[in-house]
Amino acid sequence: MAENGAAEGTAQQPQVQMNILGQFIRDLSFENVMAQKGVGGEVQPDVNVQVALDAKKRSTENQYEVITKLNIESKNKAGGEVLFMLELEYVGIFNIAGVPEDQLHPFLLIECPRMLFPFLRRIVSDISRDGGFPPLNLDNIDFVAIYRNELARRQAEAPAEVTN
């Protein structure tokens, strides 16, 4: 009896399906400021990484575009001179089915970037190395925290918009 109830409960739950249909660099900029300005001597880099996420529905059913934007700036700890700047916009195209509508937004902005992150990390490492620096190996990014911070920021702005 319990087996039938369990089977019925799982049959009602839609199976979540996610496929990465494609991924690509939409925009990339790397500037070796240190070489341009001739900064020399002992350098201790201080790296600042900013992450922004966006997602949008495509015209094909169940297809979504998820964009991860990285702005990375490396400065010398001693003098504060900029060593390099890297801007990267990386896009993944996903086919997603079986995700309830109320869970789709967090799924797109948490799970999809998480799937793309290893590729993004490799690109940043290769570009920084090819740009004349030691490879920059990004730490794992907490996409859940980024999502929650964005929700909190939007909620904080909402009352200000109502009073204006």
Image (cartoon, helix red, strand yellow):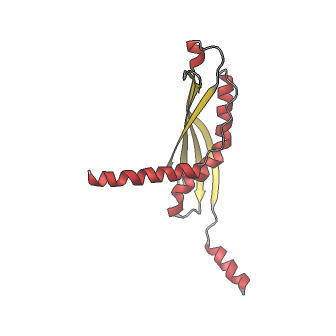
In the image, is 102 to the left or to the right of 124? left
Going 57% across and 62% down the picture, which residue do you hit? 99
Going 57% across and 41% down the picture, which residue do you hit? 91
- Of the 4 image quadrants, the one containing the N terminus is bottom right
> Residue reaching furthest top?
38
Going 64% across and 77% down the picture, which residue do you hit? 9
User: How many discs mark residues in the rendered view?
Assistant: 0
> Residue reaching furthest front?
78
| 62 lies above or below 70 | below
| 90 lies above or below 132 | below
Would residue 94 be visible to someone looking at this image? no
Horizontal and vertical percent position of residue 160: 32, 51
> Residue reaching furthest left?
164
Q: Nearer the viewer, residue 36 or 112?
A: 36
Going 68% across and 29% down the picture, which residue do you hit? 126
Horizontal and vertical percent position of residue 84: 58, 24
| 80 lies above or below 98 | above
Quarter occupied by residue 163 = bottom left
| 149 lies above or below 42 | below
Horizontal and vertical percent position of residue 63: 55, 52
Would residue 3 be visible to someone looking at this image? yes
Q: Nearer the viewer, residue 38 or 25?
A: 38
In the image, is 158 to the left or to the right of 94? left
Q: Nearer the viewer, residue 135 or 41?
A: 41
Horizontal and vertical percent position of residue 89: 55, 36
